[in-house]
Amino acid sequence: MYQIKDTPLLWEEFGTLMNLCDSIAVASDIDSLYNHISNAFAYMAMTDYPTAANFLNPMPAWPVNASCEFFKDVPNVSEKELIQDPKATALTNRQVLVFTALRNAANVYFNYDNKRGYCMDGKDSGSTGSL
């Protein structure tokens, strides 16, 4: 995500791919989104039970395992792919795969019950669900 932060030409495509509620306007919006998503994984880890849970947000049994499933088809990265062209005007195919998996994995916490009209509120860095 931090490679995207330094490449404003990619912000619109990235925001659309991540299904953000608001457009990315400044680089710090990427920081907020990072915190938002990180908190989802932290909360999933704290509630990684063998039964479905609903006290933060609706989640399946073993939400960590469920979220990891989205990454199973993402191939390993090559050294060449680690370097982001600062003049890039589009996400690479691999970035699309990784960010799609990241969005879907985070949605195990944020939108497991597939709420109609849901968008990811990257500015909600607390991500506390229904607390």
Image: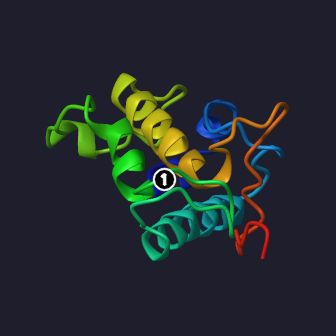
Q: What residue type is labelled 1?
A: Met
Mark yes or no: residue 21 visible: yes
Count of picture labels: 1
Residue at x 67%, y 66% (from the top left corner): 32
Q: Is residue 22 above or below residue 124?
A: above
Residue 11 pos. (x, y %):
65, 40
Along the line of sight, the residue nearer the viewer: 97 or 85: 97
Residue at x 75%, y 48% (from the top left corner): 24
Residue 119 as seen in the image, left or right of residue 51: right
Residue at mark 1: 1
Along the line of sight, the residue nearer the viewer: 114 or 11: 114
Secondary structure of the residue carrying tag 1 is loop
Residue 73 pos. (x, y %):
26, 28
Along the line of sight, the residue nearer the viewer: 127 or 23: 127
Residue at x 83%, y 46% (from the top left corner): 22
Residue 39 pos. (x, y %):
57, 70
Residue 40 as seen in the image, left or right of residue 15: left
Residue 95 pos. (x, y %):
40, 34
Residue at x 56%, y 64% (from the top left corner): 40
Scheme by which the image is coloured:
rainbow
Q: Is residue 17 above or below residue 34?
A: above
Residue 120 as seen in the image, left or right of residue 40: right
- Residue 116: image quadrant is top right
Mark 1: few/some/many CA within 10 Å (<14, 14-19, 20+): few
For the view shown, which residue lies furthest in the front direction?
Answer: 51
Q: Identify the image quadrant of the C terminus.
A: bottom right
Mark yes or no: residue 87 visible: no
